[in-house]
């Protein structure tokens, strides 16, 4: 047998040998054997993750029951299921998953939407007789899922409503985890969890480890999906499910509740829902994708109309949506600041792109010159000054933060675009795409999608904690890739974007004192700025619809000298000292995902603590 070859990334997650030896050698050996199992026997990384981190022992169950007994209050959760012609085995499994809940304070509210198969009523009647917590209503006519869901809702007495499809399955601790979240967030109307899928063999596959509340991503897809739990009063406030939105009725409901709530939207980063999806287990939305997509887009247009905005919805592969904000009445002036030192050919490509390949009506272009000396560069400066481009002298040792701060101080734009000199343009509408977001006063920064010259991804957003301080997600992926669950094809809120192409409100930049010239001369100044922007209450958006090429610091070179490496380590230490645990808790990167690789992959050890162990 040929021994399986393990990747370098696999070994990078092995524990440090500087730790106490026996315990960690044993762990390392166990992890090595698991990795061999993945390679030789085809056991998936996710199956290994489930085996290691997502199984409850009897001791866990006992501790959960003890924890429930310690609750100051025990909210009643009504599990709502609309049923129609559900196969017998799947219907039983769905109901049994509620009966198997460790948290006992639930009721099951079922509405049968005039199923013709006799086994449906037989099964439902059996469960109604078996437990007084089960309520069932039988509709005389088929009204489809929205009407059936409202019929089930009418049975509910619980303060909270959990939505369960008739052939899906809850994890046994699902309602307990929801109750924990409720008790910690009593002002919240909406809770949602991570989810995975059940294949035809009942095997758990394809986990969706979701971000915390991400309003821009939610415009592109209903990522809340399963499991979603609402405060019952919030559903009643918006009138429940609406007929005419079948296939996207959950999305429509969520949009209306979100628009009406002032409380937080709470993410429970545990896999609590198993969505059955395979041939023969199709849903309304998968069977009628066109109808479901059209309903979702009507709901989105109505949502934005309620905010006083008229938007257009463009198609994204997979039935997702690109919400295009309206053009402003007046495009704000953008000051483009381009730091440079010689390499005139590189700079010229960027400037030509701004002048001839950028469709934006009011640009101020400022070159921040850090001691350029080549005659060709100086001659080029003379030429472009005649075209209205300003040259701001920023002499001295290279300090990216200081150079940008000095140039931005002399700018006049309402928005400032920090742009590397080795960026070149692809399509003319990129800057308008970014600028449109600033019609929303909550948005402080917008970043772009950057490609290497070979077409692979250089920047699709920055993840806190990746590689120690922060790193680029999906680095090196094909530039045309949609990413897991469309995450590379959809605009979204994100913690950080690179300053290689970063558009920021000038007022916010000034309010925060600009980039940190004293502590972050070269590395992580953009990460620090983004963290401060978010700390001040502004959002940061990354959009894949502003696409440019980036040649990666060509005019400055790589940080390979001992002096540069020493400076880099100082900047790393500063970031850890300043931001601490925030670097390990990126709200837009699920704690179940590894920080050791740019490819989304289940972490060897999730950055979570099980609440029943606290």
Image (cartoon, rainbow, N blue to C red):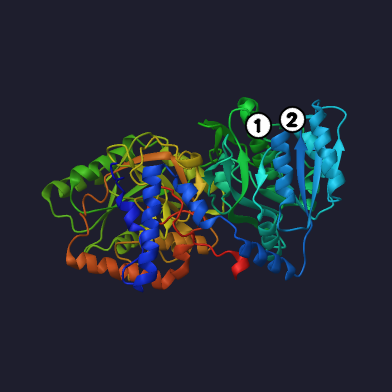
Instruction: Pinpoint residue 552: horizontal percent, then vertical percent.
Output: 27, 48
Tell me: 466 left or right of 162.
left
Return the residue at label 1. 283
The residue mark sitting in front, 2 or 1, is 1
Q: How many marks?
A: 2
Q: Position of residue 566 (x, y in %)?
A: 23, 69
Name which of mark 2 and mark 1 comes first in the sequence: 2
Quadrant in which the N terminus appears? top left
Of 605 and 518, the residue lying toward us: 605
Tell me the residue at 41%/45% (across/down).
Answer: 448
Q: Quadrant of residue 286?
A: top right
Of 522 and 139, nearer the camera is 139
Quadrant containing the C terminus is bottom right
Instruction: Inspect this view and state whether residue 396 appears.
Output: no
Q: From mark 2 to mark 1, how far is it between C-alphas?
A: 16 Å
* Residue drawn where x is 11% and y is 49% of the image: 375
Quarter location, residue 295? top right
Q: Position of residue 33 (x, y in %)?
A: 38, 54
From the image, tell me which residue sits under label 2: 244
Q: Quadrant of residue 426?
A: top left
* Number of other residues with Cα within 10 Å of mark 2, as a class: few under 14, some 14 to 19, many 20 or more: some
Q: Position of residue 417 (x, y in %)?
A: 39, 50
Q: Is residue 339 visible?
A: yes
SS at mark 2? loop
Residue 535 vertical placement versus 139 (above, below): below
């Amino acid at each position: 047998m040929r021994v399986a070859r393990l990747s370098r990334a696999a070994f990078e997650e092995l524990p440090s040998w500087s730790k106490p030896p026996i315990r960690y050698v044993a762990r390392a050996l166990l992890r090595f054997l698991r990795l061999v199992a993945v390679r030789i026997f085809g056991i998936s990384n996710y199956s290994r993750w489930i085996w290691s981190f997502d199984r409850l022992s009897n001791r866990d169950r006992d501790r959960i029951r003890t924890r429930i007994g310690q609750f100051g209050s025990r909210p009643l959760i009504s599990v709502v299921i609309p049923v129609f012609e559900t196969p017998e085995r799947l219907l039983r499994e769905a109901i049994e998953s509620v009966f198997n809940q460790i948290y006992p304070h639930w009721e099951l509210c079922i509405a049968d939407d005039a199923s013709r198969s006799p086994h449906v009523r037989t099964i439902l009647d059996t469960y109604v007789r078996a437990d007084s917590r089960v309520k069932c209503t039988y509709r005389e006519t088929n009204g489809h899922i929205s009407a059936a869901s409202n019929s089930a809702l009418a049975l509910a007495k619980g303060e909270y409503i959990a939505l369960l499809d008739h052939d899906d399955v809850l994890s046994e601790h699902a309602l307990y985890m929801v109750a924990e979240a409720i008790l910690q967030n009593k002002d919240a109307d909406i809770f949602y969890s991570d989810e995975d899928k059940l294949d035809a063999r009942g095997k758990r596959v394809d986990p969706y480890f979701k971000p915390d509340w991400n309003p821009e991503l939610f415009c592109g897809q209903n990522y809340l999906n399963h499991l979603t739990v609402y405060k019952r009063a919030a559903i009643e406030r918006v009138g429940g499910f609406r007929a005419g939105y079948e296939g996207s009725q959950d999305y429509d409901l969520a949009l209306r509740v979100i628009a009406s709530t002032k409380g937080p939207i709470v993410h429970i980063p545990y896999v609590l829902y198993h969505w059955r999806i395979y041939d023969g287990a199709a849903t309304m939305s998968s069977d009628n994708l066109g109808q479901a997509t059209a309903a979702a887009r009507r709901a989105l247009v109505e949502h934005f109309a309620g905010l006083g905005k008229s938007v257009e919805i463009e198609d994204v592969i997979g039935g997702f949506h690109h919400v295009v904000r309206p053009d402003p009445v007046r495009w704000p002036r953008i000051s483009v600041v381009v730091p440079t030192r010689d390499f005139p050919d590189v700079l010229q490509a960027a400037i030509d792109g701004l002048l001839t390949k950028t469709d934006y009506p009011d640009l101020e272009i400022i070159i921040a010159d850090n001691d350029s000396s080549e005659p060709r560069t100086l001659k080029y400066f003379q030429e472009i000054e005649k075209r209205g481009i300003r040259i701001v002298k920023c002499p001295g040792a290279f300090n990216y933060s200081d150079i940008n701060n000095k140039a931005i101080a002399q700018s006049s734009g309402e928005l400032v675009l920090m742009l590397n000199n080795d960026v070149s343009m692809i399509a003319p509408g990129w800057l308008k795409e970014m600028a449109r977001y600033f019609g929303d006063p909550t948005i402080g920064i917008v970043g772009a999608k950057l490609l290497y010259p070979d077409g692979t991804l250089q920047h699709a957003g920055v993840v806190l904690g990746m590689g120690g301080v922060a790193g680029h997600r999906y680095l090196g992926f094909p530039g045309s890739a949609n990413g897991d669950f469309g995450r590379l094809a959809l605009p979204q809120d994100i913690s950080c974007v690179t300053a290689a192409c970063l558009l920021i409100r000038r007022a916010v930049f000034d309010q925060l004192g600009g980039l940190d010239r004293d502590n972050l001369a070269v590395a992580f100044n953009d990460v620090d700025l983004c963290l401060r922007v978010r700390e001040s209450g502004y959002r940061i958006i990354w959009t894949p619809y502003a696409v440019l090429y980036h040649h990666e610091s060509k005019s400055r070179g790589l940080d390979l000298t001992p002096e540069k490496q020493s400076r880099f380590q100082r900047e790393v230490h500063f970031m850890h000292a300043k931001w601490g645990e925030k670097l390990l808790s990126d709200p837009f990167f699920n704690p179940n995902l590894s920080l050791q690789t740019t490819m989304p992959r289940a972490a060897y050890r999730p950055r979570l603590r099980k609440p029943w162990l606290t």
